[in-house]
Amino acid sequence: MREMRDASLDDAGIMGLPRTETIVHGANSAETHLATVVAMTHIQRAFLLSTPSLEKNGHVAKIQTALGDAWCGTFAGSTAHNQMSSVLAAVEQVRAAKADGLIVLGGSSAVDMAKSVAMILAEGDDLQALRIRYSPETGPNVPALLQPKIPQIVIPTTLSGSEYTFAMAITERGEKLMFADAKLIPKSVFHDPALCMDTPDRLWVGTGMKIFADCLEMLMSSKAKTMTNMYAREGLQVLFHNLPISIDPKASQSQRLRARQNLHHGAYLAMSMAFNASLGLVAGIRHQVGAAFGVPHGEASTLALPHVMRWNRQIDSAEAALADAAQSLGLGGTSQGEQADAMIEAVEQMIDTLGLPKSLSAVGVAQEALQGIAEHVVGDMSVANNPRKITTSDDVMEVLTKAY
């Protein structure tokens, strides 16, 4: 099945390759090697962006110490879903510090903040002119952001994988504004599991399921390619086997550290190739549900995923992709349909095992808000290559209603 699926893909074309220059891995690697990587990146004035929780638990102080004389300031006010007000406050502090590089400690919101700061410093703050616009009728309109950007070094404490992409979002008045520029990919990333051991389990596994959803959407995408499928399959296997171990109280400390290290590698496998394959409806839903109701991206992805899988499988290529994923995980089934069923059932079992929410109502989304969310999703570029075409908000409402 797998060979047949890949053989049917049209692999003629151009692929962009990941621009991450350095990955440093190992427990406590950030404290040990950060100063060296900063010097390698030619950063002389390093400004640290992080979150209140990481400041409170002492990790911000550790990274400031590790930066040594290169440290020129800290903004630990990154907020969930990268709110506009926090971004603009960070821009002013980074500008005042005359920083020539950004160090990020945190999850996707902190990473998106760094990308946003770098973009605004270089391109100005007319964000309506810089944002991506998309409609099913006209397709995507991605403005060219031509100015050079200051370098970023990321120390992720979740599994969002946004440190490997050149896209980001800023939330303004309940909507996510999307931006993209290849020059915004961070230069270096640390896979330091020791700094992730304090990440709350629900946040950790939620972001892991977000990456799991991304791998499945890469496989189902109308832009799927043989090479991107290889990355996505391997990412699925890493996540499937390591995510439960990473929070298992019966596992040893060393086993949980190793699982978290592996999961960082899995995030790289998925997101470093995601822009070549593209994502889909799950990504579009999480963006807009998160913006409107503050639902973490991991949880919004998780509760949407089984319903999107069922909706997409009406397209033969999507069902074949789900069967392919099931094979890669060693799930049961002899026919394509049985294997697709097995993949959906495995996802639902993972959600139960990890204790994540299974409905929009469970995370506080109001039923009367679904139509507005659906309208924003239709205009989200993430859905452009969903295997089952999305042309109106009615298409999205079919999924949101099931997910409610």
Image (tube, helix red, strand yellow):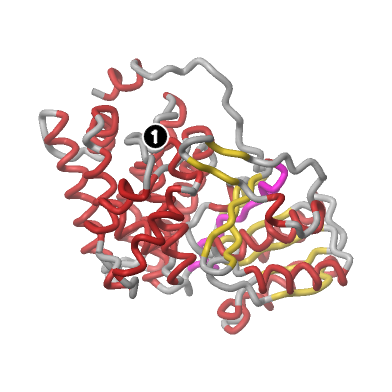
In this rendering, position of residue 257 left or right of residue 349: right
Q: Residue 238: tell me if it is visible.
A: yes
Q: Is 268 in the magenta?
A: no
Residue bounds of the magenta highlight: 183-196
At a point 68% along the width and 78% down the height, the residue shown is: 61
Residue that label 1 marks: 221
In the displayed structure, does residue 83 sit left or right of residue 368?
A: right
Q: Nearer the viewer, residue 95 or 74?
A: 95
Kindly indicate the quadrant of the structure image that contains residue 280: top left
Q: Is residue 255 visible?
A: no
Q: Quadrant of the image for the N terminus?
A: top left
**Can you give x and y, in whole percent of width and height, for residue 31 in the image?**
67, 66
Whole-percent x, y for residue 338 in the image: 12, 36
Identify the residue at horizontal 49%, vertical 53% (top origin).
Answer: 264
Residue name at image x 26 percent, y 40 percent: 329
Vertical order, 312 against 250 (above or below) = above
- Given residues 82 and 187, the one toward you in this image is 82
Q: Quadrant of residue 28?
A: bottom right
**Which x, y percent locates residue 377?**
43, 52
Tell which of 400 and 14 is nearer to you.
400
Which amino acid, mark 1?
Answer: Ser
Q: Quadrant of the C terminus?
A: bottom left
